[in-house]
Image (cartoon, helix red, strand yellow):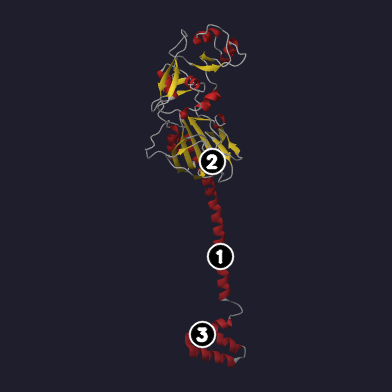
Amino acid sequence: MEVIDCFEAHSRPRKAKRISAGALSAGHGGFSMVVPSVFTNSFSLHSAWKRFCGKISLSCLRIRQNSKFLLVIPAVAVFCIIPYGMSQLINYQESFFHKIDMSTSFLTENNLVEGAMSEFAFGQTSYYDSEGNIFTEDSVKVISSVNSIKEPVSFQNYTVKQGDTISGICQKFGLSNISTLIAVNKIGNVRSVYSGQKLKVPSIDGLIHIVSKNESIGSISKKYGASVTDIVDTNDLTSEILKEGMELFIPGARLDSNTLQRAMGEIFTNPLKTKYRITSRFGYRLDPITGVASTHKGLDMACPTGTPIYACRSGRVMKSAFSSLYGNYIVVEHVDGYQTLYAHMSKSLVKKGDKVSQGSKIGLVGSTGYSTGPHLHLTIYKNYKPVDPLTVIK
C-alpha cells in the first residue's frame, strides 16, 4: 500500500486507483508483477546473475590453470626418474654374462638373450687362440707330445668321423696347434671338411713349405724361426742344396693369424653393404638416452630404416624374437664358440632353426626396443665373452 500512497502524494490519484484496483483484484500474484516494473531502473536480476556466473567461470579457469602447473612437477620428475632407472637396470643385467637355461620362464628378456649368446656351437670341448694353440675347456694349453726332434717326420692317414673337429683330431695325435692339419692338408675352410674325408696327419707340429727359386735352408730357417739343424733332421736331408718346387716340412712353424682365421671361417663380413655411420663403438660410453656411463658390448651402425642386414658369417639362427631392450633381434650361432646378435631391426627375415650363409639377407634396419633412432646394433661373442666387432670384421 506504500506504493499506492506514493502516487497519491504526487497528485496522481487516478493512476494510484488503477494500480490499487489491479493489485487487489490480482491478489499476491498481481502485486509481485507490479513491483519489478517499478524498480527496473535501479535493479536487474539478469545482470546480477550474469555477473555471478562470470565470477564463477573466472574462478574455475584459475583453478584449472593452477592444477596444470601443479601437474608439471610430478610429470617432469617421472620422466627423469624412469630413463635413469631403466639404464641402471639394463646396466645391471648386462654386467652378468653367464650360461643360462633357455627354458627357465622367470628370467628377464636380457638374460634370455645373453643365455642364447653364451651357448657353444657343436658342443666343443677344446678351444684355440689366435695363433692356433689348442686349449682344453679348463683353459689349459695343450703341449705337444713330441718335445724334441729325434727322427724325420712321418705321416699317417685319418678318416674324418661324424662329430670330429680339427682341434679334436690334433689332440688324438699329440699335436698342439690346429694350423698343422690345416696347412698340411691345404684346407681352405674347415667347414668344407666332411665325414669320410681322408686327412694326412704328421707326427709333429709344423707346416709344409714349397721351395722357391734361389731359396736356401738359411733363408727358410730365418723366415720361420726354425733352426737349420731341425729342418735338415726333420726332412732327412743329405745335402743343404735345395731344388725349386721341393717340399720341406718346417717343424714348429704355424700359419699367420689372418690365414688361420680365413681357414677356420672366422672372417666376419660387414653386415651392411651401404653407407652407415658408427654412432657408438665397443667399450665404455655414455648412454645416449640417459647420459649414464656404461659399457657398450657392441657396435652401433646408423643408417635408414629398411636397410638390408646381411649375416656376417654362416651359421644357424638360434633365436628370432622381440625384446623391450633389443627390439626385433636375431641370434646366429657359428662354429668354434662364436655368436652374433643383430638388434633393433624393423623386421626379421629368418626364424629359429634356419641355416644362413655368410652374406645372406636376414633382416632390415629399424629402431625398435631401447633405441634413439634407426641403426643396427651388432654384438659378437667368442666363448662367452664379447669382442670388438671391428677387430674381426674384414
Amino acid type at circle 2 is Ile
Q: Report the residue at 56% width, 61% height from top.
A: 61
Label 3: which residue? 31
| 27 lies above or below 155 | below
Front-most of residues 221 and 121: 221
x then y, percent, for residue 269? 55, 34
Which-is-in-front pick, marks 2 and 1? 2
Label 2: which residue? 309
- Taking the image as drawn, is residue 311 in sight? yes
Residues tagged 2 and 3 counted as in contact (Cβ below 8 A): no
- Distance of label 2 from label 1 (alpha carbons): 60 Å
Front-most of residues 220 and 387: 220
Disc nearer the start of the sequence (2/3):
3
x then y, percent, for residue 177? 47, 19
> How busy is the neighbourhood of tag 1: few (under 14 within 10 Å), some, or many (20 plus)?
few
> How busy is the neighbourhood of tag 2: few (under 14 within 10 Å), some, or many (20 plus)?
many
Q: Helix, strand or loop at disc 1?
A: helix
Amino acid type at circle 1 is Ser
Q: Report the residue at 40% width, 19% height from top.
A: 172
Label 1: which residue? 57
Disc nearer the start of the sequence (2/1):
1
Which-is-in-front pick, marks 2 and 3? 2
Residues tagged 1 and 3 counted as in contact (Cβ below 8 A): no
Which-is-in-front pick, marks 1 and 3? 1
Amino acid type at circle 3 is Phe
Q: Residue furthest bottom?
A: 14
Disc nearer the start of the sequence (1/3):
3
> How busy is the neighbourhood of tag 3: few (under 14 within 10 Å), some, or many (20 plus)?
some
- Distance of label 1 from label 3 (alpha carbons): 35 Å
Q: Report the residue at 44% width, 22% height from top.
A: 199
